[in-house]
Amino acid sequence: MPFHCLRSAAFLIALLPCLAQGADLDPNAPIQIADYQGKIRLACVGDSITAGVGAAGGQSYPNQLAKMLGERWEVRNFGVSGSTLINQGDRPYQKEGAFQAALKYQPQVVIIMLGTNDTKPQNWKLKSKFAADYKDLLEKFAKLPSKPRIFVCHPVPVPGQGNFGINEAGVREQAPMIDKVAQENQAGVIDMHSALKDHPETLPDRVHPNTAGATLMAKAAYKALTGKEAHQ
C-alpha cells in the first residue's frame, strides 16, 4: 500500500474515537469530574426560587447542592426575584446585573430555571416569544469561552393559585416548549416539577419551596449532574 494511503488510514483510525464521541454525546449525561482541572464552576440561574426565597437562610437549592457536590465544585447563585425568561416580560432576566455576572463568571456548568414569573397574565400573553427567548439565553451561555454544559429545568409546580397570577396551567404549558428548546440546543433537562409534584406541603405559599422543597430540588440537580442519588 502506498505511504500516502497508509498515512490517510492512520488519520482515519485516530479520528474514529472523536467521531464516535461526538455521535454519542448526550446532553443529559452526568458530568465527568476527571474531565476538569480544579474546581468546576457551576452557575445557578433563575428567579426568586433559585435565589432562595421561602427557604431558611443559607438553604437555597444552590446552597444545598453545593454541599452535596463537595469540594470539587464551586457553586454560585445568580437568582433574581421576579425575573422572567421572556425578554419583554415585566422583569427580564437578561436585563439584570446578575445575568452579566453569570456570564463573567465563565461557568463550566449552568443550571437554568426560569418560567414561573412568565405565567403571570401580563407576561404569558407574550408566550409566543418564550421558546425563542429561551434559545437566545442558551446561545449566550453556549458562546462563552468556557463552553459550559447547560441544563434547563421544568419549573416547580404551583399547587393552587399563586401570588400575582402565577399558575400551574402556564407551568405545564411551558414543559414541552422547554423540552423542545433543550433538544434543539444540546441542553440537558432537570425536572424540578416532578421532584416536588407529590409534595405540595413544601410549597406553603404555592410558589416558593421551603427548605425541605429546596432539598428535593438540590437532590434532583445532584442526580442530573452526577448520575447518583444524593444521601444528604
Image (spheres, grey):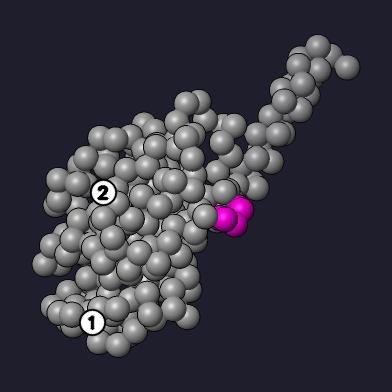
Q: CA distance from mark 1 to mark 2?
A: 23 Å
Question: Seen from this angle, which residue lies furthest bottom?
Answer: 160
The N terminus - image quarter: top right
Q: Which residue is mark 2?
A: 78
Q: Secondary structure at mark 2?
A: strand
At label 2, counting other C-alpha atoms closer than 10 Å, the crowd grade (few under 14, some 14-19, many 20 or more) is many
**Numbered marks: total:** 2
Position of residue 202 relative to residue 85, above or below, is: below
228 inside magenta stretch: yes
Q: Position of residue 169 (x, y in %)?
A: 33, 85
Q: Secondary structure at mark 1?
A: loop
Q: Quadrant of residue 175?
A: bottom left
Q: Quadrant of residue 206?
A: bottom left
Q: Examine the residues drawn in magenta and state their main secondary structure.
A: loop
Mark 1 or mark 2: name the one nearer the start of the chain: 2
Q: Position of residue 163 (x, y in %)?
A: 18, 80
Badge number at residue 162: 1
The structure residue drawn at horizontal position 49% and vertical position 44%, both measured from the top left corner, is 69
Q: Is residue 220 left or right of residue 145?
A: right
Badge number at residue 67: none
Magenta segment: 227-231
* Residue 27 shows in this picture: no
The structure residue drawn at horizontal position 25% and vertical position 87%, both measured from the top left corner, is 161
The structure residue drawn at horizontal position 20% and vertical position 42%, both measured from the top left corner, is 100
Position of residue 135 relative to residue 41, above or below, is: below
